[in-house]
Amino acid sequence: MPFTNYTNLDFDQIKTSIKDYLRANSNFTDFDFEGSNFSVLIDVLAYNTYINAFNTNLSVNEVFLDSATVRENVVSLARNIGYVPRSRKSSTAVVSFNIETEETGLLYLQPDLACIGSTKDSSYIFSITDEVSATINDGIASFDNLTIYQGRHIKHTFTVDASLDQRFILPNPYIDTSTIRTYIKGPNDTGTGKKYSLVDNIVSVNQDSEIFLIQEVKDEKYELLFGDGVIGKKLENGSEITVHYIVTDGRDGNGASQFSFAGSLKNSNGVLTVPENSTVTVTTLQESRNGAEVESIESIKHYAPRIYSSQYRAVTANDYESIIKTEIYPNADIITVVGGEELNPPEYGSVTISIKPKNGLYVSDFDKNQILSKLKKYSITGINQKIVDIKVLYIELDSSVYYNESKSSSPLALKTKIQKSLTTLSDSLYSTKIGGRFKYSKVINLIDDSDYSITSNITKVIIRRNLNVLLNQFAEYELCYGNKFHVNSEGYNIKSTGFKIPSQSGYLNPNSYLYFTDIPNTDKKTGVIAVIKPAEVPGDKPKTIVQSAGIVNYVTGEVRLNAINITETEKPNGIVEIQAFPESNDVIGLKDLYLSLDIQKTKINMVKDVIASGENTSGVLFTSDYYNSSYSNGSLIRN
């Protein structure tokens, strides 16, 4: 009887394979498997084989990092290459307390609940993990620039028992591991004991190093790992381990700006003292932010091998991205790293880093300094890092959408459907990211597929940068679009919103806005930027106020403005919007450009398709009243 390989996972195919196997046996020749009770046994065998194959497939998948789906297994596989998944991150705020007291000397704020923070929807507990002291001057103790962590402060103790195979697992999930403080008190020691340091690698660790490591275990809890006398100092039998940490709500705690004091204080004699609420003044220096959830399974799969390949050294662009995202600034949404040799002009020996946080577009100056400071221990000597704000390249659409009126009588409802589809597109990774690409074909197909009554669309693409003006002072500006511009030899390729400059000898009307435009050179590769004033009388030509205000490079997509003093802008917050039409409708986010599909500025015009509806099958009416150009308009200013 021949041997059969069961490679199918389908029940019916397995059953057929078993029958073919039995028919090959001479004892079952011409046996009717369907009409006998033997069919029941075959069903049982097939079902058993199916279940075993299914379970085997699941089990094998959990052995590899790429295919594992259970968090515990993914964490275990990442642990094999030295990767510790990022824990929940407490939202932090910076506050100052001024406390009126009759005590003298010093006042100590205890490591526990510090205050209650309020957001728009709810209140959250904020704590500290270390004791903080303040000197009492003239009856006031000032705790200045105090960083508080959202969450409950927990204190847990272990006693070392060398006779057991002991594990030190913290019993609480949702711990912010960066807040873990560990003290080791020997059998003959007094006080709280020595503070041990948390490390993420064993470089420079010897047998006397007072360190510990952590690893995630089941149910998102964490285990403390101490030295064995070879790598790290070994704990004595009977030693007491005291661990302080914060159990946090993660990103839910972001946005708290109003705080009320709720901490515990001790005087110089170690006696608790409770101030009255009226004697405590709380000043918020920074609202709570940077709270984050525990690292996802997808993120672990992505960053674990990259951190392993970097060996905790920032050399390549991927090294910087992995280390910043996992070890330094988990609030980062998108990171781009550009070597100085790629800049124009080149800046050898430097690295430019752009970061988009999860809760906005720009990283604060405080966070920038913190990131650069922490990055020093990973970077190579002689390489200078600098963090710059991301540059947003806005993409706007001007779409004329044709629809069959006989299938939909509500153009407003169709427009709403299209806007929802485009909003979903704007959130997708392939378009809204640094180094991403806006794919024109997907957009026009998306619009057509929004509703069955839509017959076609003519969509023009506009790219825009916002010029942040330094008001009432001369300044030079440069805007890089990273995409080649479409050139109309007559000009009007560059359009802007309005602005004002100082009037000279009353030549300018102080109430008139001026605009940037371009005059292409004969080679159509470069052009001159001019400042113009629109004609006040229809039919007149616009007046040129500044003949040469800068240059434009149509090939590289760059606009450079000479020193100009802008006193006012038409748009709020000192913004001048400057747009161009790309040569290709597929727009890329070059280097540190962040692509953003601007739904608010996107125009959707619903147009009846009189040919599809049968209203005008000859097309004469269509070409005269419903025709829309596929090319850019020749208007002077940005609408």
Image (cartoon, rainbow, N blue to C red):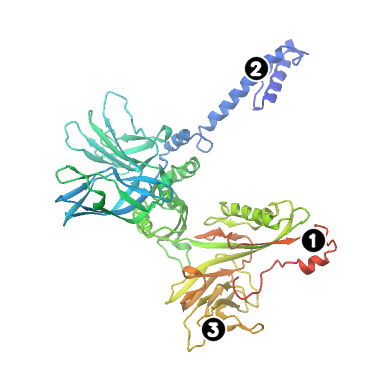
Q: Secondary structure at mark 2?
A: helix
Tell me the residue that label 2 is attached to: 44
Residue 200 seen by the camera: no
Tell me the quarter of the image containing the N terminus.
top right
Residues under labels 3 and 2: Cα distance? 90 Å
* In the depicted structure, whether residue 189 falls above or below residue 353: above
Q: Position of residue 449 (x, y in %)?
A: 70, 51
| Disc 1 crowd, CA 10 A, few/some/many (<14, 14-19, 20+) | many
| Residue appearing at x 61%, y 83% in the figure | 536
Q: Residues within 10 Å of mark 3 (few under 14, many from 20)?
A: some
Which mark is nearer the camera, 1 or 3?
A: 1
Q: Amino acid at mark 1?
A: Val
In the figure, is residue 173 to the left or right of 425? left
Q: Residue at x 14, y 43 (%)?
A: 269
Task: Name which quarter of the figure residue 88 lies in.
Answer: top left
Q: Which mark is residue 545?
A: 3
- Snapshot quadrant of residue 125: top left
Q: Nearer the viewer, residue 35 or 542?
A: 542
Relative image position of residue 92 (x, y in whole percent):
36, 50
Measured in 3D between alpha carbons, the distance from the residue under mark 1 to the one under mark 3, in whole angstroms, is 46 Å
Residue 577, label in figure: none
The structure residue drawn at horizontal position 24% and vertical position 45%, both measured from the top left corner, is: 131
The first of marks 1 and 2 along the sequence is 2
Task: Tell me residue 10's x, y (percent).
Answer: 66, 27
Would you say residue 438 is visible in this rendering? Answer: yes
Q: Which residue is mark 1?
A: 610
